[in-house]
Every structure is written in structure tokens, then in C-alpha cells.
Amino acid sequence: MKRAQRQDDRRSDGLIFLKLGGSLITDKGSPETAREERISRAAHEIREALDEAADLNLVIGHGSGSFGHSRARRYGVQEGLARSDDWWGYAETGALAARLNRLVTDVLLANAIPVLSLQPSASALCHDGEVVHLEISPVIRALEMRLVPVVYGDVCFDRVRGSAVISTEQIFAYLSPHLRPERIILAGQVEGVFTGDPLKDPHARLLRDIPLSTAHEVERLLAGSHGIDVTGGMLTKVRTMCRVVAAQPDVTVRFISGEREGLIKKTLLSAEVREGTLLHS
């Protein structure tokens, strides 16, 4: 028991959750289109960060972008299939999410990152859109073996709706109290959290700092995401991360642009990075 406790303590040291957003790694305006050059660059920066920080532990997640979201929208998977006899859309959405995950995982492996892909839908269960169960023991074991677990936005059975689509942020929120990350980094297409969608509104203003006490005011300013996102866009991302910080005040969340060359690496290596948006207690 003492040995297991020491392993848990070591695992929490330097643990970071990193998400590669669907808007970063896919073209959300074009179905099933990966931005492979962005995935490769992100993988290269992650490898460099691991080389420079021997104590860096990672859980990587990624969105489904134009692979899962457009198909989920077509079949109404997020709204629920409880009254439907046709679950083809559920199966197809899950297959597309897994297809993108295979692509991402292969690029990470090609950059000598020892990743282990863990399919969320294999164990996840939702209740009215909220994750109530996800098997965490493979994630814990992978970290103990110095592997890098990779999770992703996926379909999920739901007790109320029948079906749901769960985001990487929801998965991170479920894992967080079990794994106790020091930081969460969400790397998307845009620079951080804005007062509107900067891809649509030229007057949208970047919010550099969001204390938890002011988050409810920020939520009123937020718009949905650019392109199709059945999991709710930036507003839902911020709300989900606010719940994480409220439950674990020592955790910080930084929203950054993965488009900025070198920024993923820089943010992995230092909590003092000023780019993007910081959400904190």
C-alpha cells in the first residue's frame, strides 16, 4: 500500500493534461479532413518538451473536429437515440472518431512518443449528457509504465438519452480528481477565450485572465465555436473547466493557439507562459 501511494504521488508530479483541439487538427469546415501538418508539428513540440523535462508526465486528448461532429449532427447522436431503432449514426460517428484517433496516434508514435490510445466509448457511461463512469485503471497503469495515455472525443451510451457525444474536456474533468494534474492546456485554433467568435467577429476581444469568481460574467459574453461542434463550443469548454478548477483550486487551465509555432512546447515546459487565456481559482 505504501508503495502504491508513492507511485500516485510521483505520478501527480508534473502531470499535465494536454488537448489538441478539433479546430486545430482538422478542418472543421470540411468533413473528415485532417490538418496533418498541424498534427505533426504538435507531435514534434511534445517530443521536444519531453526531451527537455524528464519529469514531465502527460495525458493527451484530442477533439474529433470534422470527423465526428458533422456525422453526430446529421444523426442527432448528442440529442439522443433512446427512442430510435436505428443506431447506424452512433456506430458511424464512433468509427470516424476512432479513425482520427488512429491518425493522431500514429503521428505521435512516429515522433517517438510512447502513446497508448484508450477508447473512451469502451467504458464510458453518461447520465443526461454528463459522464458518470469511465474506466480509469488503464490510464493510471499507463502512467506508471511511463506511457502517454491518449483519449479523445467519442460517442457514449447515456442512461437518459440513449446516446451522447462526450468531449475531451468532459473526459479531463472526470479524470482530474483521480489523477490530480497540475495544469490543463487546451490548444485550439484561436489564441484563447474571446468575448465572441474571433473567426466571425472582428471586434471580439481576447480575455487574458479569467478568475473563477468572474467566470459567470465571462460566460455571458461567449459565443459558440466556428464550424460544427455538437459538444457546445467554447462556452461549454469554459463551463466544464470552471467545474474542474472549482473542485481543485490548485489546478490552472490555459487556453492557447496551437497554430503558434513553438507555443505548445513552451506552455508544456513552463506554467509562467503569458500567451492565451488563463482560467484559475
Image (spheres, rainbow, N blue to C red):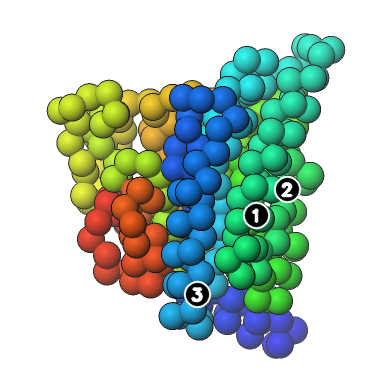
Residue 147 screen position, x and y as percent: 66, 71
Between marks 1 and 2, how big is the CA–CA gap? 12 Å
Question: Does 114 appear above or below 220?
Answer: below
Q: Nearer the viewer, mark 3 or mark 2?
A: 3
Tell me which numbered mark, 1 or 2, is placed earlier along the sequence.
Answer: 1
Label 1: element kind: helix
Mark 2, other Cα within 10 Å: few <14 / some 14–19 / many ≥20:
some
Between marks 3 and 1, how big is the CA–CA gap? 16 Å
Question: Does 274 appear above or below 189?
Answer: below
Image quadrant in which the C terminus is located: bottom left
At a point 42% along the width and 50% down the height, the residue shown is 186
Tell me which numbered mark, 3 or 2, is placed earlier along the sequence.
Answer: 3
Label 2: element kind: loop
Task: List the residue tagged with mark 1.
Answer: 105
The amino acid at mark 3 is Leu
In the rendered view, does 46 fall on the left or right side of 77? left
Residue 185 badge: none
In the rendered view, does 83 fall on the left or right side of 111? right
Question: Does 12 appear above or below 264?
Answer: below
Residue 130 screen position, x and y as percent: 61, 36
Is residue 247 in view from this perspective? Answer: no
Is residue 214 in view from this perspective? Answer: yes
The amino acid at mark 2 is Gln
Task: List the residue tagged with mark 2.
Answer: 119
Residue 50 badge: 3
Q: Are marks 3 and 2 in contact (CB under 8 Å)?
A: no
